[in-house]
Image (cartoon, rainbow, N blue to C red):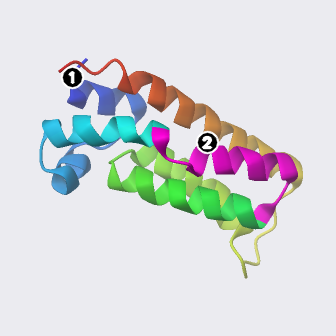
Amino acid sequence: MTVQEFYEAVGGDYTAAKKILMNDRMIRMFLPKLAEDPCRAKLETAWKKQDRKEMFEALHAMKGVCANLGLTSLSRKASDALEPIRPGTDQTISEEELSGKVAAVCEQFDATIAKVGDITL
């Protein structure tokens, strides 16, 4: 699959990625590094401990990394999960709802990583 097809498959924004990373070569260089980013592991650890502060930090980092890579769907999903647990917010969310949102983020993150390997050179 081409880089552009990858972005279509994962709900990303190819045009936004090219604005930041300039070309497909740079995109192909940086996308695999997403698998090395510690935010996914930190999110899972925090989720298991039900530590909302650590979950917020991991989700916030993931949101930013994904936005910079043009992975807009994943970035939005991370944002949707972090906003109700943002320090100082008046929003409330049950543990069950939060778990559902975090599970969805982790699932999409893992699926995105798996698809990175399908990009052809």
Q: Amino acid at mark 2?
A: Val
Residue 77 magenta-highlighted: no
Q: Residue at x 73, y 82 (%)?
A: 88
Q: Label 1 vs label 2: CA separation? A: 24 Å
Residue 63: image location, x then y, percent? 50, 56
Q: Nearer the viewer, residue 89 or 47?
A: 47
Q: Tell me how many marks there are.
A: 2
Categorize mark 2 by other alpha carbons within 10 Å: few (<14), some (14-19), many (20+).
Answer: many
Reply above or below: 25 against 120. below
Reply above or below: 92 against 30. below
Q: Residue furthest bottom?
A: 88
Q: Secondary structure at mark 2?
A: helix
Categorize mark 1 by other alpha carbons within 10 Å: few (<14), some (14-19), many (20+).
Answer: few
Q: Amino acid at mark 1?
A: Thr
Quadrant in which the C terminus appears = top left
Residue 46: image location, x then y, percent? 76, 53
Q: Main secondary structure of the magenta part?
A: helix
The residue pinned by badge 2 equals 105
Q: Residue at x 61, y 42 (%)?
A: 105
Give the side of residue 94 with respect to residue 107, left or right. right
Q: Residue at x 47, y 41 (%)?
A: 36
